[in-house]
Amino acid sequence: MTRKFDGKRILVATHNAGKLDEMRQLFEPYGVEVVGAAEMGLSEPEETETTFVGNARIKARAAVLATGLPALADDSGIEVEALDDQPGVYTADWAETPAGRDFIMAMTKTHSLLEEKQAAHPRRARFRATFVLAWPDGHDEVFEGKVNGSLVWPIRGEAGHGYDPMFQPDGYDITFAEMDPAEKNRISHRADAFTKLIAGCFG
């Protein structure tokens, strides 16, 4: 039996503005005020785990300890089948540069590795998201979502963030980055995890 959320305010433990906007839109119908980690002046904890759930739990617990608010954190990434499910939990790391994250570079690296392996088409991949909702008393709930698709090259679209311009979800002929944000939010890995979160904790 999952614990129900009965508060009016939730801290979403992310510094990613795009992700925060997405979460605000998703939470809007439930009358819950969303605050972001940057607004609260929180630093980003080091993600030292090797699983999505481990890293999400680090972020959620750190945010709860710093603010006393219930906190929702997610860890997400893309798994490419022909690359043995890489980059996976290291998706953001593949984009790291001294000047910040560069996902064009990360997508180019991914494409180059697939070319080197002469990976067959379609080049199957999935986005995965793991949510951890943590309370100040130490309790937490975990929800996992995914969306399957394939990778395209060259990249297409201006919307979205991360690997969105390279990812074409099953059943569509456009990438996440070419999609209306509302449509992407309806079918994305985060939407899948969020649906389970709502059913478990808000339903």
Image: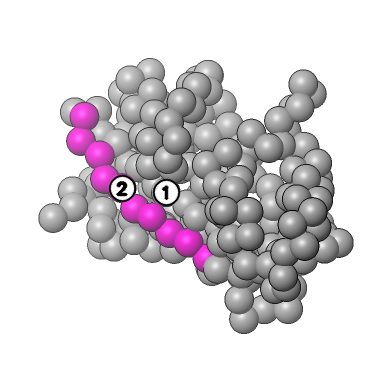
Residue 8 in magenta? no
Q: Main secondary structure of the magenta part?
A: strand
Q: Position of residue 108 (x, y in %)?
A: 81, 48
Q: Residues within 10 Å of mark 2 (few under 14, many from 20)?
A: many
Q: Which mark is residue 142?
A: 2
Q: Position of residue 200 (x, y in %)?
A: 25, 58
Q: Residues within 10 Å of mark 1 (few under 14, many from 20)?
A: many
The answer to the question of whether label 2 and label 1 lie on touching residues, with beta carbons closer than 8 A, is yes
Please give left or right for residue 88 compared with residue 96 in the image.
Answer: left
Classify mark 2: helix, strand or loop. Answer: strand
Residue 145 in magenta? yes
Q: Which residues are magenta?
A: 138-147
Q: Amino acid at mark 2?
A: Val
Please give left or right for residue 64 compared with residue 121 in the image.
Answer: left
Count of numbered tags: 2
Q: Position of residue 172 (x, y in %)?
A: 67, 78
Q: Quadrant of the C terminus?
A: bottom left
